[in-house]
Amino acid sequence: MGIQQDTRPTDGRRGQLLWGGLAVLWLSAVAAGLATLAAYDNRPGADAHAPTRWPADSRLRPDAGRPTLVMLAHPRCSCTRASLTELAELMARAPRRPKAYVVFIKPARVAGMVDWERTGLWDAASSIPDVTVVRDEDGREAAVFRAETSGQTFLYARDGQLLFSGGTTGARGHAGDNAGRATILALLTSGTAPRNGTPVFGCSLFAPDDRYAIHDASGTSHADHAR
């Protein structure tokens, strides 16, 4: 009879197989996590249904002598810091700066919290030359402009016509060259651009329980616009 060899793995071999399997699982988990983050970073927020002309019900005042830019922002959305960085770059590069507002929402549910909206983002916006920072009580300006996502930016012409609606970043929380900033800069420089809108990347301006009290000029709830 021939001698049969024991082909069962030794304890050392078992350990190698176990650690190898764990390494494969770990790498798979890391790859899945990175893919999820990448998908989140590149998923735009809800588009605004922007008024095609400057909304009469807005408490903001446009400038009849130059375009007016409005950015709606949530003071506690970390993605918005990149939007403000891009706004600062835009204002620095513009041959003639627009009248510019950064409007920070303050929902009705936090009305009693003093300075709730005065975060580091407020300070960052306030440091941009020629930008007026505004508190948006109950999110009414956001409703008037029909904005849904933090970082949503509008550019209106001197005659009140909407020129641009979109974001100033190419992904969530990522500053750098992007179509939104380039489009606004082209409109401010030459008056024309190859597009009039881009996706906006950021957090939702409204929590579900913030919407019920917000109405636009027609009496339609802000939630209705999002449907």
Image (cartoon, helix red, strand yellow):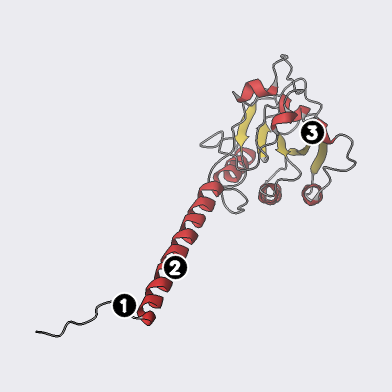
Residue located beneath label 1 in the image: 9
Q: Hey, what amino acid is under mark 2?
A: Leu
Numbered disc 3: secondary structure: loop
| Cα distance in 3D space between marks 1 and 2 | 18 Å
Residue at left 82%, top 31%? 108
Residue extending farthest to the top is 218
Q: Quadrant of residue 98?
A: top right
Numbered-mark total: 3
Q: Residue at x 68, y 39 (%)?
A: 150
Residue to which mark 2 is pinned: 22
Viewer-proximal residue among 58 and 61 = 58
Give percent across and percent down for residue 147.
Answer: 67, 31
In the rendered image, which residue does mark 3 sit on?
107
Counting from the top left corner in percent of width and height, residue 225 is at 63, 22
- Mark 1 or mark 2: name the one nearer the start of the chain: 1
Q: Secondary structure at mark 1?
A: loop
Mark 2: secondary structure? helix
Q: Is residue 16 left or right of residue 108?
A: left
Q: Amino acid at mark 1?
A: Pro
Q: Which mark is residue 17?
A: none
